[in-house]
Amino acid sequence: MSTTALNAGRRRRELADSLDGPPCDLLVVGLGITGVGVALDAASRGLSVVAVDAHDLAFGTSRWSSKLVHGGLRYLARGQVGVAHESAVERHILMTRTAQHLSHPLPMVIPLTSSVTGAQALTTYAGLLAGDGLRLSARTPRTVLPRPRRLSRSETAALVPGLATDGLRGGLLSWDGQLEDDARLVVALARTAAGRGARVLTRTRVTSLDGGGAEVRDELSGATGRLRARAVVNATGVWAADLVPGISLRPSRGTHLVLRGSSLPGLRAAVMAPVPHESNRFVFALPQADGLVYVGVTDVPSDSAIPDVAQPTREEVDFLLEVIGTALAPAPTRADVVGAYAGLRPLLRADGRTADLSRRHAVLTSSDGVVSVVGGKLTTYRRMAEDGVDAAVALAGLAAGPCLTGSLPAVGAGPLSGISAAPRLLRKYGVEAGAVLATAQRTTGLPEEELLAPVTASASVPVTRAELLWGVSHEGALDSADLLDRRTRVGLVAEDREVTEPIARWALEAASSAEGYGQQDR
């Protein structure tokens, strides 16, 4: 079994070894993008690490993003030069070193319609050129992110076949990074941390936290105990204040709609529709590799109690449809919406609208010695993790090496030339693509064509049996929700989830039996 493999048996053993055991160097609470980033950073410095979450990998905000790796243009437009440059640098690291297999350049088109004046077009294009300057400052090659340019009317219509052409005089083309999937990045980083010795424990709820560790409860067995640690990092995002009083956040809800690709046939680039009466705010239509289109995003204050899973509101759905409809013909309607999701951004509290708040992160230390990493965004997770580990190491006087994550690839990253594997597996698993299929064949004895075929007769669900089996044996999936909602994103569309559920249960049974850790470990 690979040292990076996460599964029910490994979780059971490592949780038993950790509860009421000797102290680790660092306890990390939260297994979203920041938490797994902290776990990997610390483990790669030679520290012993235990990382826990009450739910699953990428259960919270980290799976509800736009799946973009932003270069910081929006922040540059607001004068937040430091945040913008940091975003460009971190985008470069992620796309060229950490996860080349999970990221790719995405063309983004702003249609120049009659509602966009010539002066506005000039200002916007100047901003795109400034964004290209950020790319240059981060040393990202043009082979990764090409230069922005103006498009003719015919070029714009070719990239966006469903574009409203009345009054269209061309477009502005820029490039940014797009993730294969945000939750897949979290899983890859968690496995990379596990390969460096970190104990990654899902379904392990912290009931109280202090600078010396945490009281926890195993959500599967009900067992309780203490995890002792020399240093503690709270990376629970919008829930940070629940564990460490005194942290002041102002969450904002970002909602996206899910459409079938057939609603916008032939879409090869993201469409950016300006929000009326706003500067530098857009609603995006983002084509996805699995045949869906995401439309987002809102930025609405969320001052109520923080739910486990935020829900889009009717008003947000209507807003997104209305704005994106100004760029498309025919405009999508509610009938085209097959799913929707919302995430809560952990913004630092300040005056003003949440849409205007800085995405800068902060590292805070409580009076009893808990280090909390709050704020920030997905693109800058690595820098957030580095700053959090630096603070914990200094506070506890730990003997740690330097940060290595700027050059450390995640599992699956590496040259793909010469690797013979199904294109879908290469896209999702990189250099591990062959192992995904081989594991599935060894587990089930089924032929390759059956393991790589879509799991249902529905053309809208391209997920394969090989992926589901790998999710159980190597990616820590403990139930069908883990498989459908986080290891794959089938659950974004309720009807797809329903038809795929029986195959997910089959994969859980088959993989668990083959690896010998059985149902009781789930």
Image: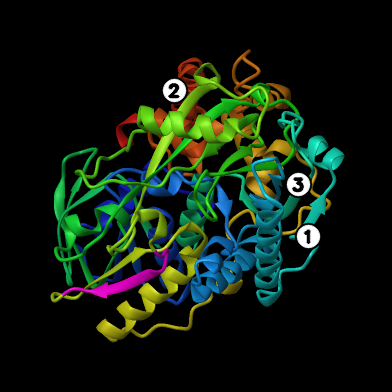
Q: Residues within 10 Å of mark 3 (few under 14, many from 20)?
A: many
At mark 1, the secondary structure is loop
User: The disc labelled 3 sits on which kind of residue?
Assistant: Gly
Amino acid type at mark 2: Arg
Between the residue at mark 2 and the residue at mark 1, the CA separation in whole angstroms equals: 43 Å
CA–CA distance in space, label 3 to label 2:
47 Å
Residue that mark 3 sits on: 171
Say which of marks 3 and 1 sits in front.
Answer: 3
Identify the residue position indicated by label 2 in the image.
505
- Report if residue 221 is visible in the image: yes
- Identify the amino acid type marked 1: Pro
Residue 434 visible within the image: no
Question: Which mark is in front, 3 or 2?
Answer: 3
Q: Position of residue 266 (x, y in %)?
A: 76, 29
Q: Nearer the viewer, mark 2 or mark 1?
A: 1
Please say if the residues under marks 2 and 1 sit with CB atoms less than 8 Å apart.
no
Q: Describe residue 57's horizontal placement relative to residue 332 as left or right.
A: left
Mark closer to the chain start, 3 or 1: 1
x, y percentage for residue 210?
Answer: 15, 67
Indicate whether residue 360 is drawn in magenta: yes
